[in-house]
Amino acid sequence: MAQVCEICGKGPQFGNKISHAHNVSRRRWNVNLRPVRAVVKGTHKRLRVCTNCIKSGKVTKA
């Protein structure tokens, strides 16, 4: 299942993990997603939403 917020579309970011000896390997920062039962068009629906959208009030919980 994709690590993507269903409200804002925010996904994982990619970068490098750099050790003390400057060995470089790829890594990713995942989004902090939470399963939420929300009201969508008058009905209840289960969504995977990032915590930023929950805090900002973009999601109305059912």
Image (cartoon, rainbow, N blue to C red):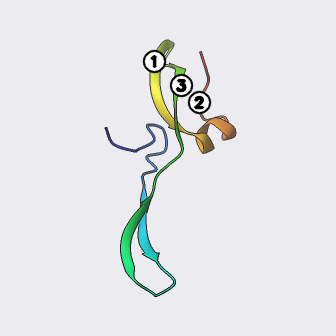
Q: Which residue is the site of mark 3?
A: 36
Whether label 3 touches label 2, CB < 8 Å = yes
Which residue is pictured at 46% across the width and 87% down the height?
21
Circle nearer the N terminus (1, 3)? 3
Residue 51 appears in which quarter of the rendering?
top right
Which residue is pictured at 40% across the width and 83% down the height?
23
Q: Residues within 10 Å of mark 2 (few under 14, many from 20)?
A: some
Question: Residue extending furthest left?
Answer: 1
In the rendered image, residue 48, in percent from the top left (x then y), is placed at 46, 32
Q: CA distance from mark 1 to mark 3?
A: 8 Å
Observer-side mark, 1 or 3, equals 3
Q: Is residue 32 above or below residue 60?
A: below
Q: Is residue 51 above or below residue 60?
A: below
Label 2 secondary element: loop
In the rendered image, residue 2, in percent from the top left (x then y), is placed at 33, 42
Residue 46 appears in which quarter of the rendering?
top left
Which residue is pictured at 53% across the width and 25% down the height?
36
Q: Which residue is the site of mark 2?
A: 59
Q: Residues within 10 Å of mark 3 (few under 14, many from 20)?
A: some
In the rendered structure, find residue 45 and report the number of the disc placed on it.
Answer: 1
Q: Residues within 10 Å of mark 1 (few under 14, many from 20)?
A: few
